[in-house]
């Protein structure tokens, strides 16, 4: 069952020409469109399905700085401030609440890892602190206890995926951007070696710049034009409970399970580090760059062979601009949730909190998380194709940094001074032999 998403008003007629086409209406694309419209650019957002139909509505709703890869931390910190500004700026409730984030554990190894992260993050001057066993108990009233300690960031927050991206899309429309749903982009339109627009299933839209924010579909589109984008995907499972006792008002990471309080009084529940990976042609092609990451994450992955081997974002499909494409055949990726993970999440919740034992699941869903080997997104111009920019590869944490990613992408497209150093997010690391290593985040 797909999570509910607030519908967004659509425009059927495509413009003949705009300044910027944004391909993809997840949070990366919509936030960039909003910021570009604020800068005065004519923007068209073109989406093969519906706004926030894929991973941007299927994530946990965490907006965190804590335990980020240090290369991404400046973007995360900027994003938290931007989340807070957006409600007043847009006049819309995006569900953001600065309620804090707490991790607790009964494993000594977790504490050592969090302590190391805190020491390395100290120069960034974000608010984070280690918790003693007594402090961890105090911050989890009603839990079974027995925690050895924990970690807290009181300035982290949460937002509602079902509201946030649609609300931001409507705010972009109010500034003049147009939204075109159920309209697949089939490829780039080139003139004299430069990108000059996109070819869609409804016709050509000319543009001086194109921002590709296609989530798991980004690599497939780039391969169509001979460009390398090192990407893999993992199927996630999450679920929402019925209204429940408020064991936390923010985000809480327990051994084996994560909780996020929802505006409806329930919880969104996820299983950190757990997922399903389908063997695919794209995966085999990029097995080398992903090897270190695979070794680090292998314990939480189930592996199978499915449709991904021949179809969907990880197939090696070829197509012409005047015929149906994989994007039209797959308007919205809606993978089924894994029952074993739902049961594991319910068991972990009940074991940690007696008041949550036997709680009912209101709905559950699967998602497809796009990954890069270093778990750092690409937000960058694509140098071999003048006029092309990309914002993708968010590796399961794009929702929280979405407003900052959108602003950085808009700065780069517009040629303005970027809000943070864009070097860590450069596209060229995919092609120049850079050792992408393994993820630095926890």
Image: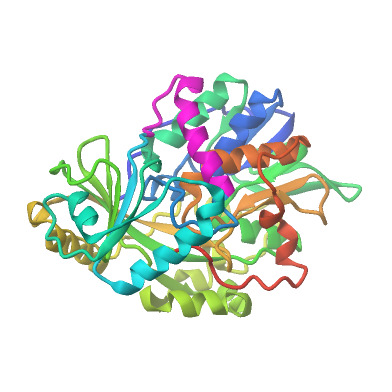
- Specify how the rendered protein is coloured: rainbow
Image quadrant containing the C terminus? bottom left
Q: Is residue 205 visible?
A: no
Reply yes or no: does residue 75 show up in magenta. Answer: yes
Reply yes or no: does residue 183 show up in magenta. Answer: no
Residue 25 location (% of width, % of height) = 54, 40
> In the rendered view, would you say 415 is above or below 271?
above
105 relative to 331 in the view: left or right: left
Q: Residue at x 53, y 65 (%)?
A: 440
Residue 328 location (% of width, % of height) = 55, 50
Q: Is residue 200 visible?
A: yes
> In the rendered view, would you say 34 is above or below 332?
above
Residue 424 location (% of width, % of height) = 67, 56
Query: Predominant secondary structure in magenta?
Result: helix
**Residue 288: quarter of image:** bottom right
Q: Residue at x 81, y 52 (%)?
A: 385
Single out the residue that lies furthest toward the right: 192
Q: Residue at x 45, y 73 (%)?
A: 278
Q: Nearer the viewer, residue 4 or 180?
A: 4
Q: Nearer the viewer, residue 8 or 438?
A: 438
396 relative to 388 in the view: left or right: left
38 relative to 353 in the view: left or right: right
Residue 137 location (% of width, % of height) = 18, 55
> In the rendered view, would you say 89 is above or below 370?
above
Q: Residue at x 81, y 54 (%)?
A: 383
Counting labels gives 0
Q: Nearer the viewer, residue 266 or 305?
A: 266
In magenta, the rendered stretch is: 74-96
Q: Nearer the viewer, residue 341 or 225?
A: 341
């Amino acid at each position: 069952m797909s999570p509910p998403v607030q519908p967004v008003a659509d425009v059927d007629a495509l413009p003949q020409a705009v300044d910027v086409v944004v391909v993809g209406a997840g949070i990366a694309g919509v936030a960039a469109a909003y910021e570009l419209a604020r800068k005065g650019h004519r923007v068209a957002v073109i989406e093969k399905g519906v706004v926030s139909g894929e991973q941007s509505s299927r994530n946990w709703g965490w907006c965190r700085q804590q335990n980020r890869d240090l290369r991404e931390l400046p973007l995360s910190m900027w994003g938290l401030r931007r989340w807070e500004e957006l409600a007043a700026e847009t006049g819309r409730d995006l569900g953001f609440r600065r309620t804090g984030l707490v991790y607790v554990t009964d494993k000594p190894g977790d504490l050592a890892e969090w302590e190391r992260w805190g020491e390395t993050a100290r120069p960034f001057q974000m608010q984070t602190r280690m918790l003693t066993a007594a402090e961890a108990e105090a911050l989890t009233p009603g839990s079974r206890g027995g925690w050895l300690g924990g970690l807290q960031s009181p300035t982290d927050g949460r937002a509602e995926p079902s509201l946030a991206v649609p609300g931001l899309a409507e705010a972009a429309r109010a500034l003049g951007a147009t939204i075109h749903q159920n309209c697949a982009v089939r490829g780039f339109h080139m003139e004299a070696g430069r990108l000059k627009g996109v070819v869609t299933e409804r016709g050509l839209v000319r543009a001086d710049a194109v921002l590709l924010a296609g989530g798991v579909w980004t690599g497939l589109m780039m391969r169509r034009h001979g460009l390398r984008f090192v990407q893999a995907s993992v199927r996630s499972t999450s679920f929402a409970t019925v209204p429940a006792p408020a064991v936390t008002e923010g985000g809480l990471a327990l051994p084996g399970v994560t909780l996020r309080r929802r505006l409806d009084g329930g919880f969104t529940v996820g299983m950190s580090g757990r997922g399903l990976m389908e063997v695919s042609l794209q995966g085999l092609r990029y097995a080398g760059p992903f090897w270190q990451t695979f070794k680090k994450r292998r314990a939480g992955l189930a592996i199978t062979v499915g449709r991904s081997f021949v179809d969907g974002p990880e197939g090696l499909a070829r197509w012409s601009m005047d015929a149906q494409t994989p994007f039209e055949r797959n308007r919205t990726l809606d993978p089924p949730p894994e029952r074993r993970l739902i049961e594991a999440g319910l068991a972990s919740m009940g074991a940690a909190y007696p008041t949550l034992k036997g709680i009912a699941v209101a709905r559950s869903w699967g998602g497809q998380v796009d990954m890069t080997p270093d778990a750092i997104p690409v937000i960058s111009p694509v140098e071999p194709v003048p006029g092309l920019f990309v914002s993708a590869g968010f590796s399961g944490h794009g929702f929280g940094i979405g407003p900052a990613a959108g602003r950085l992408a808009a700065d780069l497209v517009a040629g303005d001074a970027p809000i943070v150093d864009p070097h860590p997010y450069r596209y060229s690391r995919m092609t120049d032999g850079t050792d992408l290593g393994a993820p630095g985040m926890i």
